[in-house]
Amino acid sequence: MGMPEPDREFQQRLLTTFRGEAEEHVRAISGGLIDLENTPGAQERAPIVEKVFREAHSLKGAARAVNLKEIETICQSTEGILAQAKRREIALTADALDVLHHAMDEIERLLMATRGERPEQGPSNGANLLSRLEAISRASAAVELSGQPDVEVALRWPEAEKKVAEETVRIPVDQLDRLLLQVEELVPASMGAAHRSAALRELAREVSLWKREWAKVQFVARFLQQSIDRDGGTLDKRVFETRRLLDFLEWNDEFVMRFGTRLNGLSRSAERDTRSLSSMVDSLLRDTKLLLLRPFSSLTEAFPKLVRDLCRQQGKEASLSVRGADVEIDRRILQEIKDPLIHLVRNCIDHGIEKPEERAHANKAPRGAVTIAIDQKSANRVEIAVSDDGAGIDPQRVRDAVVKSGLVSAESALAIGDSEVLAFIFQSGVSTSPIVTDISGRGLGMAIVREKVERLGGEVTLDTRLGVGTTFRLLLPLTVSTIRGLLIRVGERSFIIPVTFVERVASSKRDSIQTVENRATVLLGGQAVSFVRLHEVLGLPADGAGDKGSTSLSMVVLAASERRIAFQVDEVVGEQEVLVKSLGPQLVRVRNVGGAAVLGTGMVVPILNAVDLMKSAVKTVSPPAPVREVEESTAPQRRSILVVDDSITARTLLKSILEAAGYLVRTAVDGAEAFATLRETEFDVVVSDVDMPRLNGFDLTARIRADRILADLPVILVTALESRQDRERGIDVGANAYIVKSSFEQSNLLDVVRRYV
């Protein structure tokens, strides 16, 4: 018999509450374990052990309350180990801390399963984990504090922590999101009230104008009235009609006076109500936004463990420091930048930080440093800097990668300066990694970072010094709901440009536009600035765009990515605060458009993406380069691939995936057969397993690289061997990509193959 519906709903709400609490405990435990790794002294470790022990105990109790036995069992074993460590019965060695980290990974996997999500780390290994935890508990490597008896250390907590904590309440984030959405909907109403109040004021001014005009002729009407009254006995029909007209004018005067008095009263009341409503809406919106502000530390809590795990995988040493973690940012901004920050940190470890022996050779400390720093630049802008003290980015390697990707020719690449060529790392398909792995090498990560940052209305820049380190700077808004925007008109259409990117509004004579190196420029402030017509950048018709009868031009100068461009517009209406509305899931990414706004008049106006406009403007004035398209159109469409694997199941799977993608595929059962086939038939790519009889994948790759004819043939290794040593051997023998079967996905394979064919 199933659970009654009310009980089921209560259990689901309880589970949702538990997940939020459990995630906080897991983050705290993981952070404490990393602190233990970085704290060598037993005396200094004692309060950290106590803190982690309490977190594990609380998590165990919460898991028991919702009947999650697996999590409760893991917490029980973890708590037991920490209790023994408190009593100095066991030592928390590096291996022991590794197992405790794996325990937290397993709990995270189980939490994802309660949501119905697919875990990212691969299959569960709970039974093996519990046996490893028990092995630690049975260890008897007791340690004593230097010269101190084996007793538990009494912890002294700061006096401030003894005070009663500020009362808080847990509210689901989706409820806060709905509340903010409803409050934001009041902004157009407030703007509409202000618009109607302005209309009433204008109407009152029209009545005042009527009064002035009537005062000019009122004495004439009175003179006629008096004349008719004197000659009342001799009235003819025309005089009688004139008198009726004069009577109406007298009544009309009184009526308009009464109407004007009431209108002035209504105008003053509307203005007073508008000020009150605007103040209340602004205050309510500000306070509601504060509910959704979260400290930057809430995003970076998991990063120390990320750095630790990546360093362990790659045989490197690095520490992570976070500065400005108390700066508060809109939760929606934090959600959007989480993946870009993860990629940048992975990039620091994978591409930046050197191995200890390499750092020693360069007179650096064996342990590298990765830093995430956040700094509030203005009332609504923050800068996040992700830096490392590693090898830096070699411009020549980037130049070679750009040529290899086909973005520019080898001759053109030589003419590009080092600072300009570094900007290409944000282009899709450009990577300096010598091999494609599940961590890096596909040339997509930095392009995604830039796209996500720019979608938020921000920008990303790069500073690097060879041998010293690299810093990526992300300039972002603090919130995404309202912005100050410049309302402009192009032809019959209106647009909003965020004022953050507006350097100035200017006007210039038409004959001041000059052509320099086939590009239009205008002289502003003694400097030549690129000049484009906004309707051309947006692809709007020329009809109505630009007042051809005027001798002057209105321009908006935008500054972004160290570039200034003057955009011609038809009219600059003014600056105002607008509510940003997303374009919805159907229009996630529209070129040159970052959202929409509802004006006080009820008109929906597109909000232009300033960074996109700058790029589109450069493309508009740059000559086309169709050479690559012509080459691709004349190239053969079907490419041939040799699949090498001793498992018939794996061969069949890879063959079917590649054939479904349109490739011609042949197979070989081991490296020896594959090499013989390569000597007889020409292929475009080799996809090979590593662990095979007769000739394994590493040796096959080495033979291909040693062969004069086959030396440039791309080789992709798809293998179950995922250790750091195996990856490095793949690089050493000359493989182009290394895909681990445990994280194998069909799209990953096809993306890598397309890169090399």
Image: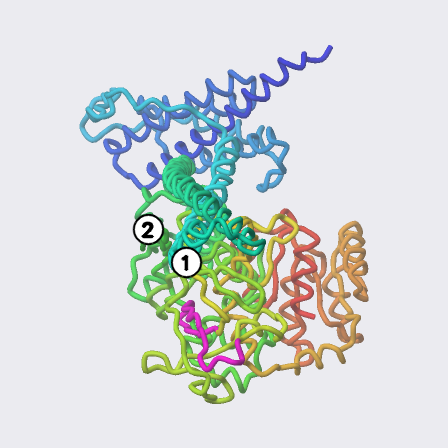
Closest to the observer, 176 or 538: 538
Is disc 1 placed on a helix, strand or loop? helix
Q: Is residue 252 left or right of residue 151?
A: right
Closest to the observer, 492 or 126: 492
User: On residue 379, which mark appears?
Assistant: 2
Q: Which residue is mark 1?
A: 220
Q: Which residues are the magenta region?
A: 547-567
Question: Where the C terminus falls, by quadrant?
Answer: bottom right
> What predominant SS class does the magenta segment belong to?
strand
User: On residue 532, which mark appears?
Assistant: none
Closest to the observer, 488 or 443: 488
**Is residue 724 positioned above or below 508 on the image?**
above
Residue found at x 74% / y 61%: 644
- Amino acid type, residue under disc 1 in the picture: Val
From the top left corner, tell me how far across and down residue 428 is, in percent. Answer: 57, 65
Question: Where the N terminus falls, by quadrant?
Answer: top right
**Is residue 117 positioned above or below 674 on the image?**
above
Q: Quarter-wise, where is residue 748 in the image?
A: bottom right
From the top left corner, tell me how far across and down residue 230 is, in percent. Answer: 42, 51
Residue 300 visible in the current orientation:
no
Residue found at x 61% / y 70%: 540
- Amino acid type, residue under disc 2 in the picture: Ala
Query: What is the distance, in whole Å, between disc 2 and disc 1 at their CAs?
Result: 62 Å
Residue 109 colored magenta? Answer: no
Is disc 2 placed on a helix, strand or loop? loop
Most distant residue in the top direction? 1
Q: Residues within 10 Å of mark 1 (few under 14, many from 20)?
A: few
Residue found at x 29% / y 58%: 365
